[in-house]
Amino acid sequence: MNLRRSELLAPGAALVTVVLWASAFVSIRSAGSAYSPGALALGRLLSGVLVLGVLLVVRGEGLPPRSAWRGIAISGALWFGFYMVVLNWGEQQVDAGTAALVVNTGPILIALLGARLLTDPMPPRLLAGMAVSFAGAVAVGLSMSGDGGSSVLGVVLCLLAAVGYAAGVVAQKPALGSASALQVTTFGCLVGAVGCLPFAGQLVGEAADAPVSATLNMIYLGVFPTALAFTTWAYALARTTASRMGATTYAVPALVVLMSWLALGEVPGLLTLGGGVLCLAGVAVSRSRPRRGPALRAAAPEEAPEPQPEGARESA
């Protein structure tokens, strides 16, 4: 019963993550009109740390074990800190389509790094699904790209964001073997916030002049796409491979298209719709497993959920 519950909770946590991360692209563009990249990242991280810290105290979880700190520190510096700053900066330099296209090289880098450093398996279905999803991301990116809306600097920044994202995910995976999802997320977010403290002066100055809507978007980014979504991500990552979780994020471009359609009335074109469908189809393929008969399953059982520490099993 517990195994069945875990099989349902992990995909559910991944779904929450991709939906909230998709909404983050819209909020970043909105808040970025009033806040500089570093100030927006720091405000987002401080909001996230506040919420996560309260949850950590309420749940009675203390400091992560010493063995988890290396992964927490690396993922906090590269993913929570570096990634958020350069992504904010990149989205000010390029249009949303180009940003989404370049950042979506991240899952490919995760698969390569995961295979090299974590010995993640690379089954044919995972590779095929990633190829289909990336083709969909290319279609979405091209359809959303505006004329003359990109710059070399912006593309480089988005590429650096993808590298930081991929390296952070791969570093985070081992930490989840000994610490809970809430611990890894909370202290990773704290590491990122500390790294962004040099932007504190900018944050204070810009907050005084920023419209309320921009500040609310920044807080939203900290509470939902950061505190909640990074925790559900860590929960799901602890129960599968980094490569498979990275492939799941290819659903983000499709959800961004859907959200823009429903919330902003931006009717997508046929190329955009087709790309979104490919993204979702690729995710479905990458997360599927070949059917096996009883004899084959007995000889080579399916990948079982990894054993989790007590704290990790309790975090959701």
Image: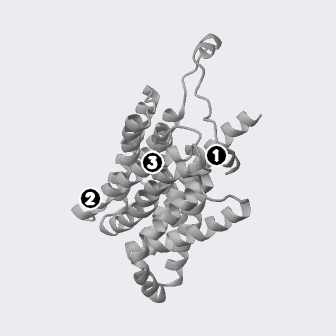
Image coords of residue 195 (percent x, y): 42, 68
Q: Residue furthest front?
A: 66
User: Label 3 to label 1, Cα distance in Å?
Assistant: 23 Å
Q: Which image quarter is the N terminus in?
A: top right
Give the label on residue 12, or none: 1
* Amino acid bearing label 1: Gly
Q: Residue furthest left?
A: 152
Secondary-structure class at tag 3: helix
CB-based contact (under 8 Å), mark 1 and mark 2 = no
Q: Relative to the observer, which residue lies in front, 152 or 60? A: 60
Q: Relative to the observer, which residue lies in front, 224 or 192? A: 192
Label 1: few (<14), some (14–19) or many (≥20) C-alpha neighbours in 10 Å: some
* Tag nearer the camera, 3 or 2: 3
* Tag nearer the camera, 3 or 1: 3
Q: Residue at x 55, y 73 (%)?
A: 219
Give the label on residue 126, or none: none
Q: Residue furthest right?
A: 1
Q: Earlier in the sequence, mark 3 or mark 1?
A: 1
Give the label on residue 156, or none: 2
Image coords of residue 87 (percent x, y): 38, 63
* Amino acid bearing label 2: Val
Vertical placement of residue 95 versus 252, above or below = below
CB-based contact (under 8 Å), mark 3 and mark 2 = no
Q: Residue at x 65, y 47 (%)?
A: 312
Name the residue carrying label 3.
171
